[in-house]
């Protein structure tokens, strides 16, 4: 038997078509294509929205300006005697900024608390970016402080305006922990001591 005859005889026992496997990948069963269902996603809900000044503001009296000018003149004289001319300019700049902030009232900001985070004007912060919150009284008004995980901005300062403090707390509690006691830093304690013992304005409200 020749080699060609052996090859032909062997081919007779081989299957002509591989019927056990699919010819093309298209023969495999395809998973069902599911169209997105809008009802599966819950919509963003606005929990609370209000308008309030962008920072705590209280109109200062005449005593505030006179006392500030006297303190500035005293510091300027001391710095002049030590030839600290650059520091003299810094002191004048700081007093000018404080007078501007005390004279010009802030514009109103739009605040919104939703199921996804907090919106301040055009800035939005997700709940995952925020850490906790607490309240503090500044210039006689309640202020909401929301701390962030990142160093910047570090803390969101939100004035409540006419919104009730307890209402804001009840809205935030499902998303952020509430810090009941906040330890004041050394600078805050020093500022409170100076404001209490050497007030620039006779009508300075309590910060507690």
Image: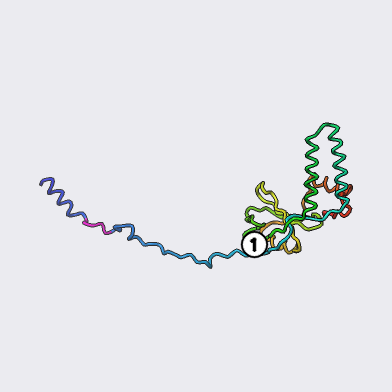
Q: Secondary structure at mark 1?
A: strand
Residue at image location 23% in from the left, 57% down from the top: 17
Where is the C terminus found, in terms of image quarters?
bottom right
Q: Quadrant of residue 128?
A: bottom right
Q: Is disc 1 surrounded by few (<14), some (14 to 19) or many (20+) residues within 10 Å?
A: some
Picture quadrant where residue 78 is located: top right
Hey, which residue is sitting farthest left in the picture? 1
Question: Is residue 8 depicted above or below 82 in this figure?
Answer: below
Horizontal and vertical percent position of residue 13 = 19, 54
Does 39 appear above or below 198? below
Q: Which residue is mark 1?
A: 114
Q: Is residue 75 left or right of residue 19?
A: right
Q: State whether residue 75 is above or below residue 156.
A: above
Residue 123 vs residue 15, the one in the foreground: 123
Residue 141: percent from the left, percent from the top? 79, 58
Q: Which residues are magenta?
A: 15-19
When the figure is inspected, residue 16 is found, relative to residue 190, above or below; the finding is below
Nearer-the-camera pick, 148 or 25: 148
Q: Position of residue 185 (x, y in %)?
A: 78, 46
Q: Residue 95: x and y, percent?
A: 80, 45
Q: Residue at x 63, y 62 (%)?
A: 115
Relative depth, front residue between 23 and 198: 198
Magenta highlight: main SS: loop
Which is more toward the observer, 141 or 126? 141
Residue 42 drawn in magenta: no
Colouring mode (rainbow / by chain / secondary structure / one colour): rainbow
Measuring 77% from the left and 55% from the top, which residue is drawn there? 105
């Amino acid at each position: 038997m020749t080699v060609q005859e052996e090859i032909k005889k062997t081919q007779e026992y081989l299957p002509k078509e591989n019927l056990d496997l699919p010819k093309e990948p298209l023969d495999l069963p395809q998973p069902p294509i599911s169209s997105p269902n809008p009802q599966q996603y819950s919509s963003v809900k606005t929990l609370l929205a209000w308008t309030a000044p962008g920072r705590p503001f209280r109109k200062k009296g005449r005593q505030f300006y006179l006392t500030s000018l006297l303190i500035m003149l005293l510091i300027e004289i001391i710095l002049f005697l030590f030839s600290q001319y650059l520091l003299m300019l810094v002191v004048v700049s700081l007093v000018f900024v404080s007078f501007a902030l005390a004279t010009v009232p802030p514009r109103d900001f739009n605040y919104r608390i939703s199921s996804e985070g907090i919106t301040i004007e055009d800035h939005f912060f997700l709940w995952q970016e925020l850490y906790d919150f607490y309240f503090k009284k500044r210039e006689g008004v309640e202020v909401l402080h929301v701390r962030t995980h990142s160093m910047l901005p570090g803390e969101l300062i939100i004035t409540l305006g006419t919104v009730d403090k307890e209402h804001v707390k009840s809205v935030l509690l499902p998303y952020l922990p509430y810090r009941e006691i906040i330890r004041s830093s050394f600078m805050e304690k020093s500022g409170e001591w100076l404001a209490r013992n050497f007030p620039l304005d006779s009508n300075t409200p309590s910060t507690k």
